[in-house]
Image: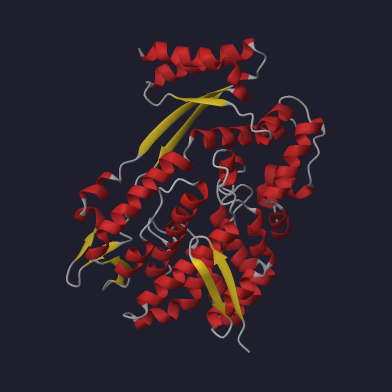
Amino acid sequence: MSIKRIFHDPIHKEIIFDSAKPEELMIMELIDTIAFQRLRRIKQLGAASLLFHGAESSRFTHSIGVFCIARKIYESLVKSETKFITNKFVLFGAALLHDLGHGPFSHTSEAIFNHDHEYWSEKLVKNHPQINSILNKYGSELPHQIGELFKSKSLFSKPLKTLISSEIDCDRLDYLLRDSYNTGTNYGLVDLGRIISALTVSPDGNIAIKPKGVIAIEHFLVLRNIMYRTIYNHRINEISTWILEKIIYTIQKNYDAKIWIDKSLQKLIFSPENIDIDDFIRNDDITFYYHLIRWKDESFEPLNTLCRMFIDRDLLKASNISFLSKIERLEILAFARKLCQANNYDSEIFCGIKEKSFKGFRSNNSLKIWDGVYQSALENSSELIKALMKSEESSFIIYPSLISNEIKKQISTIRN
């Protein structure tokens, strides 16, 4: 008997799964695993809800959206490239499970815990009992094939690698649409239908774009650039990450002070190389938030102040100093640290410079234009895409709000 499940998604509307189709039955079973359900407790945009109050959606929601896009692309490509049908189970499984390894607060974990989510996604696919058992039912090589796609240097399958992990993949197509919607910015309105209809398979077996899709790709890359500048690299995100980094740093330096901490998070902070799958599953946003609340009320200075700042959204301030020379930035930092000390703030904890790099589009020859006769790199067919390959650097000085006026005056003095 066929069973259908419907997910009502704000981006893709009805996402329907049909158990009569083996590949979709596999996805339904994977969704019900403990490891995948954990993604409900991992925010897609980490601490960005402190800035954009609607940014509360989860990695669970995003992952189902990525699967939905992968299925649409598959259904489009298989019409003209019937050999692509052999990739169905690998593509669908990888699209759904690509973010399985995210830690608390998603990408913020990579900064505060030095966490590698791709490594953990691969590890869970290959070693989590439920995930591994389900995948093996549909193909003994599936856990290995899917896990290999999550490795940054893997060349297991060019077309699948392009769709799962490249500059223009199913992941990015979903998160630009979803993050734009949830932040209320309307920047990331990708023309998804146009991009999918323009995808094809080139003679070398990789995914390519038809000439008619170049403008849609240009639009996608412009929107990606804007989203990074206005949302992902926003100064409030940088401040929030700074505070969380200093919370973990303070705990690591003062663990003898009898800080309450459960064993799973203790391993994540002090010995991530020893963390096992059960410990990993226990670490999510809820667990971490609970620790922050406990530390806010029961710890010592400066840990309790840092936790209070984050929990109560009473954040540090930040000013853009990207336009200053490196020497001038150091002068501002020295000035800010003196003010911190004069106001009884630990200048190493509550003050510093946060550098950020936004890497432009990198084609890596992963997605080329194929017109049926000739194949060429995207950037060779578009001056706009070539311009978007440029990287951008930014620099912020972070400091307590108490000294905000003095810092701004000093920056203005140096600038003039």
Indicate the position of residue 261 as horizontal and vertical percent values.
78, 42
The color scheme shown is secondary structure
The residue closer to the viewer here, 167 or 318, is 318
In the displayed structure image, the side of residue 281 where residue 138 appears, left or right: left
Residue 360 showing in the rendered view: yes
Indicate the position of residue 112 as horizontal and vertical percent values.
60, 40
When the figure is inspected, residue 416 is found, relative to residue 174, above or below; the finding is above
Instruction: Give the farthest residue toward the left.
Output: 373
Q: How many marks?
A: 0
In the displayed structure image, the side of residue 267 where residue 79 appears, left or right: left
Indicate the position of residue 41 as horizontal and vertical percent values.
66, 54
Find residue 307 and report its image quarter: top right
Indicate the position of residue 135 as horizontal and vertical percent values.
59, 75
Find residue 229 and report its image quarter: top left
In the displayed structure image, the side of residue 197 where residue 181 appears, left or right: right
Find residue 288 and report its image quarter: top right
Residue under the image location 61 percent in, 29 percent down: 315
Quarter in which the C terminus is drawn = top left
Residue under the image location 58 percent in, 46 percent down: 46
Quarter in which the N terminus is drawn = bottom right
The residue closer to the viewer here, 182 or 164, is 182
Residue under the image location 57 percent in, 37 percent down: 241
Residue 99 showing in the rendered view: no
Residue under the image location 61 percent in, 23 percent down: 350
The residue closer to the viewer here, 150 or 242, is 242
Instruction: Give the farthest residue toward the bottom.
Output: 1
